[in-house]
Amino acid sequence: MLARTAVRALANSRQFSSSAARQTKVAVLGAGGGIGQPLSLLLKNDPLVTSLSLYDIRGAPGVAADVSHIDTPSEVHGYAADKLDEALEGVKVVVIPAGVPRKPGMTRDDLFNTNASIVRDLAAAVGRVAPEAHILVISNPVNSTVPIVSAVLEKLGVYDPRRVFGVTTLDVVRAARFLGGIAGADPADTRVTVIGGHSGATIVPLLSQTEKGKGITGEVYDQLVHRIQFGGDEVVKAKDGAGSATLSMAYAGATFTHALLRGLSGEKGVITPTFVKSPLYEDQGIDFFSSNVELGPNGVEKIHPIGEISAQEEKLLAACLPDLKKNIEKGKAFVAQS
Ligand SMILES: NC(=O)C1=CN([C@@H]2O[C@H](COP(=O)(O)OP(=O)(O)OC[C@H]3O[C@@H](n4cnc5c(N)ncnc54)[C@H](O)[C@@H]3O)[C@@H](O)[C@H]2O)C=CC1
Ligand SMILES: O=C([O-])CC(=O)C(=O)O
């Protein structure tokens, strides 16, 4: 399982990996935030990261000074608000958790007005300074921010769809954990492919494709699907105005980053769901979609088909597609009007 593999790698981080010699510089934009700080901590412990570039409009040099004392080989540098270009020099991977989080009663789409321009401007800087970088978008609403990043890069003439990813790994992490809880099994044995997008009804878990999930029916099935789709709301409610998931998201972000770095380093068979430019529903006007993607030396190596799904999952997918289409179009329209 992907998450388990990442944990093992992180645990082994004190051994200087031979792959580390490859010099992989990773930047975190939004490194001073609730996600950015623990994500920076986890990336400092990833043996595939040789240099960590931490940027935020507030607090990144402090986070960098703190994290830099951890006794792993990677270098860490922090950059203040006016040092974005410097932060991006020579980076191979850029992870973006910059932007505002939800408060109770808000949808992810309610974050659009603030986060769309933050993500647009950061993407433009990446396109200018590090046009070959792989960009991992965490900032919500992911269903719109990924099309925003893509459209910005397209405008700059540097867009390669194999290098832009929406991080939907938290949905995969939650699905494994929640199914594991119900099945009384180790989440390593209850990995679920989650497709679609990253908000409410656009999150579609394919429980029928897992050994432990396929027998679940009735109310238990409905509750499990609802919990996977609205797990984010659970955290927003519990934090009661203090934000949304940060620690589990940092874990998910570090897990996905590690998977990408494994793919980039030439490892075969690294497959995980991620929200990318995709042909799967293009005939319905939906050109971004999350499904199992094989990661390789160029980023997206292969987009896997959805495979066989149940009648219930067909219904979930039918509910997902119109919402997803609207979210994608909103992101594209924002850049077109910018
Ligand atoms: N993809 C996913 O599964 C998830 C996404 N998120 C999203 O991640 C985003 C960040 O969440 P938190 O870390 O909890 O928020 P936060 O408010 O704790 O941190 C955000 C950070 O971004 C920084 N920032 C704002 N504008 C910036 C700019 N122009 N350049 C660089 N940094 C900038 C802020 O100074 C702050 O340090 C939110 O949009 C949230 O909805 C949260 C959880 C899961
Ligand atoms: O719920 C939120 O706003 C943050 C998020 O995307 C998640 O936890 O899945």
Image (cartoon, rainbow, N blue to C red):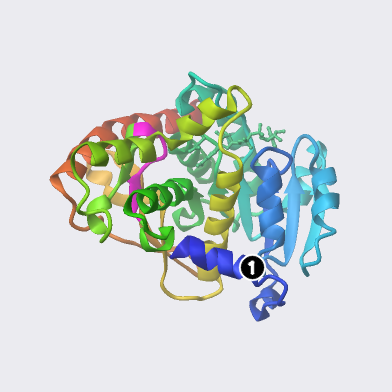
Residue 33 in the image, given as x and y percentages of width and height: 70, 38
Question: In terms of secondary structure, where does tag 1 sit?
Answer: helix
Label 1 is placed on what type of residue?
Ala
Q: Is residue 48 left or right of residue 112?
A: right
- Highlighted range, magenta: 192-200
Task: Residue at the far front: name it.
Answer: 184
Which residue is the site of mark 1? 11
Residue 301 in the magenta stretch? The answer is no
Residue 194 in the magenta stretch? The answer is yes
Q: Is residue 292 above or below residue 154?
A: below
Q: Is residue 184 above or below residue 338?
A: below
Q: Is residue 102 above or below residue 300?
A: above
Name the residue located 79 percent from the left edge and 54 percent from the top edge: 67
The response on whether ligand 1 sits within 8 Å of label 1 is no
Name the residue located 61 percent from the left edge and 44 percent from the top edge: 247
Say whether residue 176 is visible: yes
